Image (cartoon, rainbow, N blue to C red):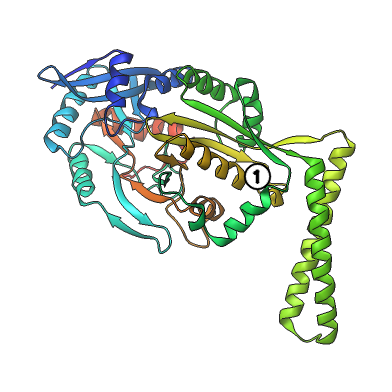
Amino acid sequence: MVIKEISRTEFDSFSKNHPLGTFYQTSMYGEVMSKCGYTDLYIGGYLNDTLVAGALILSKNISLNVKYGYSPRGFILDYSDLDLLNDFSKSLRKYFNKKNYGFIKINPMVIYSDVNAKDNTKKVNETAVRIFDDLVNNKYQKLKNNVYFESLLPKYNPILNLKTFNYDNLDKKLQSNLEKIGHKGLNIYKGDIYNLNDLYELTKRKEDVSPDFYKYLYKTFNEKNMIDLFLVDVTYHTYLEYLQEEVIIELDINERLNKLFQQDPKNKQIYSEKMLSDKKLNELHSEMADVNEKILRGITKETVAGALVIKYKNVATIYTSGFIKDYKRLLPNHYLHYMLINKYKQEGYYFMDLNGITGNNSKDNPYKGLNDFKLSWNPKVYEYIGEFDFIISQNKYALLWSTHALHREFDKKDLKYTED
């Protein structure tokens, strides 16, 4: 196999027409990352002058005279063709060894299993098991299992089939919440590059990126009409009216429970319901006071949720999203996602990638709220094959390990390495 650098145009065409092509493997994403300390390289693998494999490789110095590469959701090739994988790996190692690379990190979009989130069982893809073994045999160093978010991209992704999405199939509690949202003063609108600071304020607590990164991302993908920014704001006068109505309803409930409790003060169930009603009333009054204070300060509207959506082929991916948690009764995140689902369904997209969840669905999972929210839309959950370091030079890789250069580069992402 012949390995050589190819043009951005040739690479984008190859990626777009390959089943494993993703926006992470485009020149647009490479251009964005070139603003973030990487050099973007576009590599093609040729058999008999036919392009059969490719990869965007983000290159960076990791120590003196040693580089590493990162191919997000790459390489792009038929991993089930073991001869092709062997040939490409061997040729790629030879090519990059001459350029003083220690390794290339990959996290392919090869589906290892379908996950049943309800009982946390998996249906393993036997072809992916064979691919895993062949990767290891070709000196792809498997990193530790990404149960949470230890690696650079999520291992577990919930994908919503927009063609079959049906509101009636949603959980009744979610349906009830969605039906109430229309009375809360929420409004969704499409933003532009001038609204990116609003999005950053909503997501900065969970994203290790700068405001400039969003600007690079938006500007680059917007040139190809591949990105949308949506924001949700709340009109506080409308929301205050909703809260006042909720107080009236809850006061009636609370008064009824008080009468029942006076008649039967030893009834634990009534006592428990009364305590919950008291708590809800306190929360409602507290929230009304907060909203009134904002209105008195002249704040009549506020951005409470937002998302960046990248569109590639027939998939709309929620690249990042965030919301203000202070006003949980608003349910801005529910409103945002429901509106996005309907928008891209109407526009003819086949799938919506809700972005990563964790592989732990237990009650003590620190990300349980995140998992529960995304799973409430009834997506299909796929476990990808995982993250690997493709060893170019074993000596260089061992040196990077022993000098903690790997740790310094990736520990900020909580990336865990095996020690064997």
Q: In which quarter of the image is the N terminus?
A: top left
Does the image show residue 65? no
Q: In which quarter of the image is residue 185?
A: top right
Does the image show residue 138? yes
Q: Would you call the spot at circle 1 few (<14 residues within 10 Å), some (14-19), or many (20 or more)?
A: many
Q: In which quarter of the image is the C terminus?
A: top left
Q: Quadrant of residue 174?
A: bottom right
Residue 152: horizontal and vertical position, in percent?
42, 36
Reading the image, the residue beneath label 1 is 332
Q: Which residue lies furthest to the top in this view?
A: 7
Viewer-closest of 284 and 403: 284
**Picture layout, residue 367 above or below residue 8:** below
**Residue 399 appears left or right of 319:** left
Residue drawn where x is 72% and y is 48% of the image: 183
Residue drawn where x is 60% and y is 25% of the image: 211
**Residue 217 appears left or right of 152:** right
Q: In which quarter of the image is residue 306?
A: top right
Residue drawn where x is 30% and y is 25% of the image: 15
Residue type, numbered disc 1: Pro
